[in-house]
Amino acid sequence: MSTMSYPKTEGTTDVSIPLTPGWYLLSVLSLLMGFASISTDLYLPAMPVMGQSLQADSGMIEWTISGYLIGFSFGQLFWGPISDRYGRRIAVGSGLILFVVGSAGCALSNDVFTMIGWRIVQALGACASVALSRAMVRDLYQGTKAAQMLSTLITVMAIMPLVGPLVGGQIAAMSSWRAIFWVLVAVGVVTLGALYTIPETLPAQSRNPEPLAKALLRYVELLKNRRLLGYLGAGGFLYAGMFAYVAGTPFVYISYYHFPAQLYGLLFGLGIIGIMAANVLNRWLVVRFGYDQILLYGTLMAMLTGVWAGVVAYNDLGGLWGLVVPLFFFASTTGLIVANSIAGALADFPQRAGAVSALTGAVQYGSGIFGSGLVGLWADGTAWPLGLVVALSGLGCLLSMILLIPARAGKVK
């Protein structure tokens, strides 16, 4: 495989990365990007039994997801500038160690509040992998090509939430919900080993030398950029709806509609299949129309399907499948929104890719705090809280696109 070498600078060693990154490198990046999903999706089917074990109601167990999102959201704001200054691998590796410690703490928890605390620690580590894998893609690609590669990675990564609930349900059935978190400990250790088999993507001469405190203050400057706000809003509202979906469907499907817990992963997997299909479609569409145009179509679809889910949930139309269908289409819009909103956010800030990627992730997963938190706060034993949050999220996606992203003529390369 051909490579390109960055020139040596004093006190550094020569670093080479593939000119055309191979599938092994892309596979490791997909694994890193998948930590947000695997950390939550694996234990979704065990949430009801976990609540019984920890003597907590459904609302409190749903806060284990919200607590995770708190750590995941704010942690990225620190990992981004750290990676821009010291390189991607050292930041991701440090995060993976923290993830392993947090996962072990979750496995040993004996009450829901301790569990929420360790979930925050787990998330502080996991977020480094997710945020910085996106920055590593930006190190290697630009513009439309970056959007294509992000779609590819998200498609590959989507296998994890597709099989996660199924695997988690089987682990819980054969052992206990604690065994799920021990599996995550093992995943973290294996990923840490894989990280150090791939090259550093950010050469020393391309790093940001400014002090971390100053780099953190520059987030304020980024938030003054109107187009960036539009991309952040489109992705953020989508994630609010998706994490409402993640937090709410186990109880709606299993407790309200009495769907078997061990088969929950099949219903959850339908949405993942939709996401994968939409990402494959996005790879083709983005070359032809540009990521801004496809993002507009995606947010419009999110609004329509979100409102559809809200109406169905409020009136209890069609039972279980009446809700599964609109949620499937809403989840599928992830393939048209996430990669394109990230590519758009990163496009204008090549020298601050780590910080912008971290800010993007912080907004997305921070929005997830509200989405999952509101489902738990408004929980009433029906599907209505889930439908309401998804509907509001879809509306927010479209409004962000219309109000904050000015039309740009032609394709965006």
Image: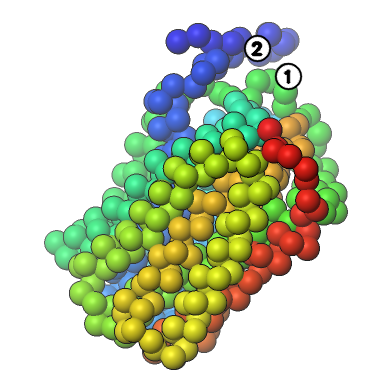
Comparing 387 with 216, the one in front is 387
The answer to whether mark 2 and mark 1 are in CB contact below 8 A is: yes
Comparing 314 with 222, the one in front is 314
Give the amino acid type for the residue marked by disc 1 in the picture.
Gln
Comparing 395 with 3, the one in front is 395
Q: How far is the residue under mark 2 from the one under mark 1?
A: 8 Å
Q: Position of residue 26 (x, y in %)?
A: 45, 30
Q: Residue at x 78, y 51 (%)?
A: 407
Q: Residues within 10 Å of mark 2 (few under 14, many from 20)?
A: some
Give me the disc on residue 6.
Answer: 2
Q: Is residue 211 visible?
A: yes
Q: Which residue is labeled 1 in the image?
A: 205
Q: Position of residue 402 (x, y in %)?
A: 74, 62
Q: Position of residue 323 (x, y in %)?
A: 38, 77
Give the amino acid type for the residue marked by disc 2 in the picture.
Tyr
The relative height of residue 51 versus residue 34 in the rendered view (above or below) is below
Q: Is residue 113 visible?
A: no
Q: Residue at x 31, y 79 (%)?
A: 320
For mark 2, give the secondary structure.
strand
The relative height of residue 131 versus residue 207 in the rendered view (above or below) is below
- How many numbered marks, from 0 up? 2
First-in-chain label (2 vs 1): 2
Q: Residue at x 41, y 48 (%)?
A: 276
Q: Residues within 10 Å of mark 1 (few under 14, many from 20)?
A: few
For mark 1, give the secondary structure.
helix
- The quadrant of the image that shows the C terminus is top right
